Amino acid sequence: MSSEPIERRVSYLGDRLLGNRCLICGKEYFEIRDYCGKCGRKSYGKMAKTDLFYEKGTLEVCTLINEPTNKFTKLGSYIYGVVSFHDGRIRVPGRITDRMPNCNENVDFSSLEGRSVVPRFRRRYSVEKSDVVPTISLAFTFADEYYPYQERRTAKSRKEYSFPGIVGYGVYSSRFRIKEENIVRSVPFIDEDSVTAAVEAGKLALIHSGIDSSLVGKIYVGSESNPYAVKPIASKVAQVLRLGEEDEDVQGVDAVDTEFACKAASSMFKDAAALVNYPKSDVKYAMVTGSDNSQAAPRDCPGGELDLFVGYGAASFIFGKCDLIAELEGWYSCTSDTPDFWRRDGEPYPSHGGRFTGDPAYFKHVRKSSKKLMDKLNLKVGDVTYFVAHQPNIQFPIRIAKELGFKEEQYLPMLQVAKFGNTYSGASLVGLAAVLDIAKPNDRIVIASYGSGAGSDAYSFVATDQILEKRKNQALTVKYQAENPFLEYVDYTTYRRLKTGM
Amino acid sequence: MQNRAAVVAAGRTKFGEHYEKEPEKLIEEAWLKAAQEANVERKDLEACYLSDYFLPITNKLGLEEGFLSELTELHAPMEVTRSFSSALTNACNAIQAGRYNIVLVGGIEKMTDRWDKIRDDLMLLEDPWSYYAGCTPEANHELLLRAYIKKYKLNGQDLEKLGIALAQIAVKNHLHGSKNEYAQYQRKITIDQVMKARKDAHKQLGLYDFAPISDGAATLIITSEEEANKYTNKPVYVLGSSSATDYLTYPAREDMTHFLVSQNSIKNALKISGRSLSDIQLLELYDQSTMMEMVSLEDLGFCQPGTAWRTVYENCEDYKGYYEIGDQKLYVNTSGGLKADGNPLGATGGAQVFEIVKQLRGEAADHQIKSDQRLRYGCVLELEGFGTKGYAHILGRDEE
């Protein structure tokens, strides 16, 4: 897309489904306008912004599109229709995503019309490789399927803690899976990528935490599959989720992408914690997101071994000092220059050092960070309720957990790689979320991430009493997403097509 | 009405694919036919109003006036609009105001050159938000049908009849088109063909429910009432023209089952002309789809909301060439409509007016209506986008 201002205007309104409501007569409009058509000039300055991104709509009427326009051809066929919000007071066009209707299928439209739908943040359509990637939320999924509608309630913080920790979190993975032997892996739908996953995870984290998004002062997004070599994912997340104080169309938030293979996000936990703890920072909350559409060369190409393990997903954690679900006790990070896995600039797929990825790389660093942290905090294996490790495959995290002396009940809950695949920057974070989903107050969690290149960050968290009350804001738990009845399994060819995206 | 604008001549090309002809050549052809008919020289023209919907996109022609000036060595004032109806309305206004006495109104479009990208262009221009959400030019018509079915709670036999009525509209238009020497499709089709196309598409509307993309041009020579007799003894007067505008975003409109622009423009056009609906004998509707034609019968007021399908169904079971609504005989889309005659956007309205003019003058050759009453009044409805703009024109001849 060459005309960037047009692209920005469309994204600005379309990503969040921004509209207006006349405060005099209540008439609502999609898009922003200065006046109400009914009330005229007296409504100037009396138009309130409406944000439909967190709302539930109704699919009013629909049809099947089996011959899309050129830019949509990669989507194949899809259901398209009109979605209404607020009892029909506002209507928008919308595409139903996460479904692959057969173009030779007779769809019973009346069985779909009238059902509740949730707006989803997706890629808009295909563009050239050098173009800006257009996005939109005029894409919807049914609220009674994979992605349930969750009301977003924001509340004033009630309790302040002495030390910082996790305020809320969200994990997002797609509806699609590929199952091969003993491993199931998540596959992005064709209009998804690491940007859309980061937004979804952040959205779920905001819903879970119940905080006001304008109080988030910093967002870090770690990824190794950003569709751009230059242009942050974090800016998109900040804009769509309206992080920080909003002034016109600029968000009062610091947004930055980080890179360190699979520990790009976990590395920032301590930075986020330190930032919210620094009294003069004026940052009440900081968001850390790890998101990847994990890349791998096709199976028959060099480096194609990774294609057996890569997944898709994102996890987002919000740090702060109020209403914590887990306090951060301490951390230890270590680094050495170990090129076990890398991707040169301009290369589409990563390369790896084969047998060296295990011992001189993964095990050495995870062992070091975990041991040092436990020594530092004077923790014995028995003091830890759950151990979480980075999980590039099934064997590595089990082997290191056993070597450190952990028992099955301590490490099995974190093992998610067989359900989602290796979600790279999100891998250890998804493990942490899975454990937080079930943790009881005072449970201690030790997490050790790993990033090739190489380094590891170990953290120790202790769950608070508030973890239980916030759990009701978490419909999309890790378990829910892993065992969902609406999962759709695809074959290898479809998996490669979906993963490559639009 | 004082100083009525008079159509003294009309010309057009055949609609369809004109691979070998440049756009300006098409308009030249249409102009020469009209000029010959009225014996008008190009130096007589005081101004030109041209319409094309998107030549700058399809044919990379920006300053259309310049191409025409170069071709015809004409240096008179020229204005370019998007639709033929808009050009016609502007021309009539200028004539009535006494500004000009004789003007050329022309419309041109060449769409088939860009057949592979045309649906993206059409959709993006007609309703960008729907386009961004994945809409196609056909989908809005399908949603209109879905919304109609829902609003009027049609099911069972009624729903089946609605489907047949829409197919009958396509069959009727092809029947009319088969006798129109200028039509893009001059062949008859059957209900079975329409139904099979829908079945193949797995949708409620199929290939035969939609107008094609076309190349073509149409022109009218318009004069003041005073001057008209210099050029013809059978002037057709533009008795009333009106237009209306609605939201670009179709789903955001208050009523998704009807076109506000049609309702408003017909009301005003009738008021200006001093005629009533019951005077109308000929009607050229803008049938981008069979559904759009059916709904337009309701929007213009010929049928009650929610009933046009029944009127069509009852009249088409044994089609006599017209609809009988009460005691009114209504000839609808005798040209073949957009469906069979073709739909080169900027020229489409020209062909619609051309048809009414020819019929009223008794010059419609093979498809001249044989009515027991003298034909005096016709009406044209042209839409832009998916009902974002609407134009209604009441055309008529004086008593003999």
Image: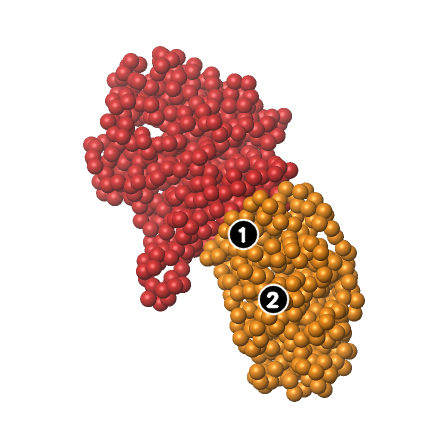
Chain colours: A red, B orange
Between B195 and A488, the residue placed more toward the observer is B195
**Chain ID of residue with mark 1:** B
Q: Looking at the image, is mark 1 or mark 2 nearer the viewer?
A: 1
Between A319 and A9, the residue placed more toward the observer is A9
Query: Residue A322 sits in which quadrant?
Result: top left
> Is residue B53 among the parts visible in the rendering?
no
> Is residue A143 among the parts visible in the rendering?
yes
- Which amino acid, by three-letter code, is at mark 2? Leu
The disc at residue A428 is none
Vertical arrangement, residue A272 with respect to residue A91, above or below:
above
Q: Position of residue B173 (x, y in %)?
A: 70, 58
Residue at image x 57%, y 28%? Answer: A490
The residue that disc 1 covers is B148
Between B15 and B161, the residue placed more toward the observer is B161
Vertical arrangement, residue B267 with respect to residue A374, above or below:
below
Q: Are marks 1 and 2 on the same chain?
A: yes
The residue that disc 2 covers is B381
Q: Position of residue A152 (x, y in %)?
A: 33, 40
- Which amino acid, by three-letter code, is at mark 1? Tyr
Residue at image x 50%, y 29%? Answer: A487
Counting other residues with Cα less than 10 Å from the Cα at mark 1, is it few (<14), some (14-19), or many (20 or more)? many
